[in-house]
Image (cartoon, grey):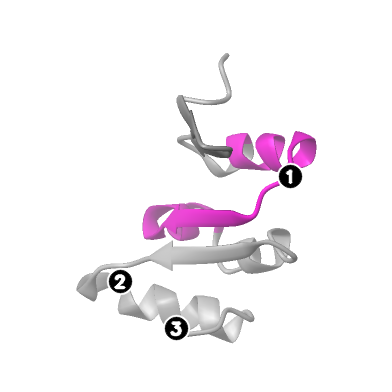
Amino acid sequence: METILQEYCCTGICISCVDSISKSKLILADNSVDLILLDMDAMTEAGPQLVHDFSGTDCVILVNERQAYLAAEAMRAGAID
């Protein structure tokens, strides 16, 4: 099974897109990553522990107005607003 759904590279910046937390962990194990963008559905899949799993890498968690409670859970786990 292919890990990366899509990968874009331009001017020295590479962006990889995956569709699961487990696939993102495989990329992190083998590559240097500067920033992770997470859809809040990923937080729902993995829970607040995800903040600790990705510690040491900057993460931006994207939420909508109906998911504010999940953002609060992430902040209790160590995320910053």
Give the left or right position of residue 19, taking residue 28 as reference.
Answer: left
* Neighbourhood count class around disc 2 (C-alpha, 10 Å): few under 14, some 14–19, many 20 upward: few
Secondary structure beneath dot 3 equals helix
Residue 72: mark: 3
Asked if the stretch drawn in magenta spans residue 25, the answer is yes
Q: In which quarter of the image is residue 3?
A: top right
Q: Quadrant of residue 12?
A: top right
Secondary structure beneath dot 2 equals helix
The residue lying at 22 percent from left, 75 percent from top is: 65
Secondary structure beneath dot 1 equals loop
Give the left or right position of residue 72, taking residue 32 as reference.
Answer: left
Q: Position of residue 58 (x, y in %)?
A: 61, 65
**Residue that carries the numbered disc 2 in the rendered image:** 67
* Neighbourhood count class around disc 1 (C-alpha, 10 Å): few under 14, some 14–19, many 20 upward: few
The residue segment tinted magenta is 23-46
In depth, the one of 80 and 48 nearer the eye is 80
Q: Which residue lies furthest to the front in this view?
A: 11
Give the distance between the C-alpha atoms of the residues marked 1 and 3, in whole angstroms.
28 Å
